[in-house]
Amino acid sequence: MKSAIEIQDLAPYPSQEMAERKGLGHPDTLCDEVVESVSKALSTYYLEHFGSVFHYNVDKALLVGGASAPKYKGGKILEPIELFLAGRATSLVNGEKIPVDELAVAAAKKCISSHLRFLDVEKDIRIIPKIRPGSSELVALFKRFGAGEIPLANDTSFGVGYYPFSDLEKKVLEIELFLNSPETKSLFPYIGEDIKVMGVRHQGKAQFTVAVAMVDRFIADIGDYVEKINSIRSSVAGRFGLDPAQVFVNTADNYPQENIYLTVSGTSAENGDDGQVGRGNRVNGLITPFRPMSLEASAGKNPISHVGKIYNHFAFELARELVAQGFGDAAEVFLVSQIGKPITQPQSIQIKLQNRTAFRSKIEAFVMDYLGLLPHFWKKIVLADK
């Protein structure tokens, strides 16, 4: 079956926009990052031991915040965080048992340790795996991949993507990456990993609100806290060529009452802030309500046939390639699958291009050829950090 392709003009971007990014230590990001680490661990194990990836989806996680008592010069964790991991995974292959729970817990601990410098994964967090075998119907759909055939979509879902980023989106992304970079942490160790950046642009004017979980062991008193907040604000403004009046840091603080954003470990998860997969950044690292944006929880889904994952990643890459090939100045891509059909045959493809430069037939041919990459697209996801 040939996929239906529709090509439309893309309207200019509106004068008002907003964009958000939840940083490394945000509870929602932690859930996404953990289940994606579990996904990669399972894929790697299957490949190394059996030469093929088997059916799994480990895209459910709930983080239940703990309790802590932060204070100047160092507080303590009172009750550990709890992290529940749920999903489905092949646990028996040719009579050989797969250590699914052990792989999941090890991957989760490694991920959390790499994200949070001051959280002890052996005592400050409890990881509870609840991963069960998959349904027979979805396992059967998946077997085509192991036989060397084009995988069949295991869901009727959609993926969306766009390119390029706006200036505001770039700054939101770059501000969080800057504040959570090793270089910044070495200069400002009091900056925790739980950072959220919200950018708003109205009639050409932008401002950025940044929430930073401050690490208490590096803060002497309220005066020291205020000084360090101001240093963060100045650093962000200077780094990105902004007026300090455009940058706001920890705006909920009440200095006279000393009600401030102080943490022991650098994340709000230590003291009652909860997290869940799919509530954070999309696959491009941002939350962008003025753009086409899927609500699909991509993290943790298998990258072979789960279109809720691969179509979203692929849509962004296709949008980028359409611009790189000179078909337009900007692109938006929308893909819709149908369960049980080859992933290379979406039931609908919509392309929007700004200042289109080529005939529709040429763009359609390019898109159809590019869809042929989908059976191998999983390697970019699984092997991304290797």
Image (cartoon, rainbow, N blue to C red):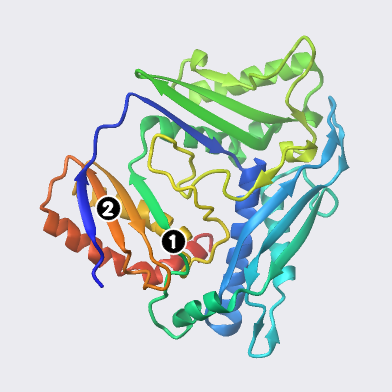
Looking at marks 2 and 1 on the same chain, the residue that comes earlier in the sequence is marked by 1
User: Between residues 331 and 76, which one lies in front from this camera angle?
Assistant: 331
In the rendered image, the vertical position of residue 158 relative to residue 51, given as above or below: above
User: Between residues 310 and 107, which one lies in front from this camera angle?
Assistant: 310
Task: Say which quadrant the N terminus sits in.
Answer: bottom left
Looking at the rendering, which quadrant does residue 372 occupy?
A: bottom left
Real-space Cα distance between discs 2 and 1? 16 Å
Residue 266 in view of the camera: no
4 left or right of 338 in image: left
**Residue, x 72% and y 51% (percent of image)?**
113
In the rendered image, the vertical position of residue 83 relative to residue 373, given as above or below: above
**Residue, x 35% and y 17% (percent of image)?**
203
Image coordinates of residue 215 in percent, x first then y, are 75, 32
Q: Amino acid at mark 2?
A: Gln
For disc 2, the marked residue is 350
Q: Amino acid at mark 1?
A: Ile
Residue 213 in view of the camera: yes
Determine whether the residue tagged by mark 1 lies in a helix, strand or loop.
Answer: helix
For disc 1, the marked residue is 310
Image coordinates of residue 246 in percent, x first then y, are 49, 17
